[in-house]
Amino acid sequence: MTARSTTTVKRSTPKRDASVAGNVFTRLVEALVTGELPAGSPLREAQVAKQWGVSRTPMREAVRRAAEAGLLTLRKN
């Protein structure tokens, strides 16, 4: 008998997650620019994610990107 090497291939969805986060980021920027999310008001990630029908992970990524772009200021609870 010959020993066979087995390789486990992980199925991950970083491209899909990245595209969802990208879509959420685009929508977040639009909401900030149009005033749908008013300047200076607190942004509750979980609440907006629920309203928009997305999970918290892509919302969190979109918020991080918006903060890096200077569109948001991150504050600790």
Image (cartoon, grey):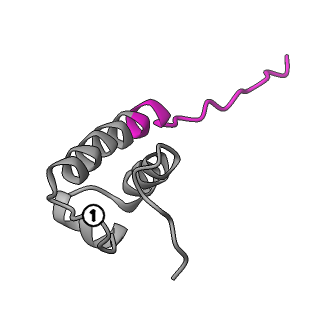
Q: Residue at x 22, y 48 (%)?
A: 33
Q: Indicate the quadrant where residue 23 lies.
A: top left
Q: Residues within 10 Å of mark 1 (few under 14, many from 20)?
A: few
Image position, residue 1 (x, y; %): 85, 18
Position of residue 45 relative to residue 65, above or below, is below
Amino acid identity at mark 1: Ala
Q: Which residue is mark 1?
A: 39
Q: Nearer the viewer, residue 65 or 55?
A: 65
Question: Which residue appears at 21% of the width and 44% of the height?
Answer: 30
Q: Tell me: residue 28, above or below residue 56.
A: above
What residue lies at 35% left-to-right and 67% top-to-bottom?
Answer: 45
Judged from this view, the residue extending furthest toward the bottom is 77
Q: Which residues lie in the magenta part?
A: 1-18
Q: Does 2 appear in magenta?
A: yes
Total count of labels: 1
Tell me what residue is drawn at x 48 percent, y 52 percent: 67
Q: Nearer the viewer, residue 59 or 2?
A: 59
Residue 65 screen position, x and y as percent: 47, 45
> Which element type, helix, strand or loop, lies under badge 1?
loop
Q: Viewed as shown, does residue 25 lie left or right of 6?
A: left
Q: Is residue 38 magenta?
A: no
| Nearer to us in this view, 44 or 71 | 71
Residue 30 vs 47, above or below: the answer is above
Extreme front residue here?
A: 40
Up-down relation of residue 51 to residue 1 (above or below)? below
Q: Splitting the image into 4 quarters, where does residue 8 fall?
A: top right
Q: Position of residue 68 (x, y in %)?
A: 52, 46
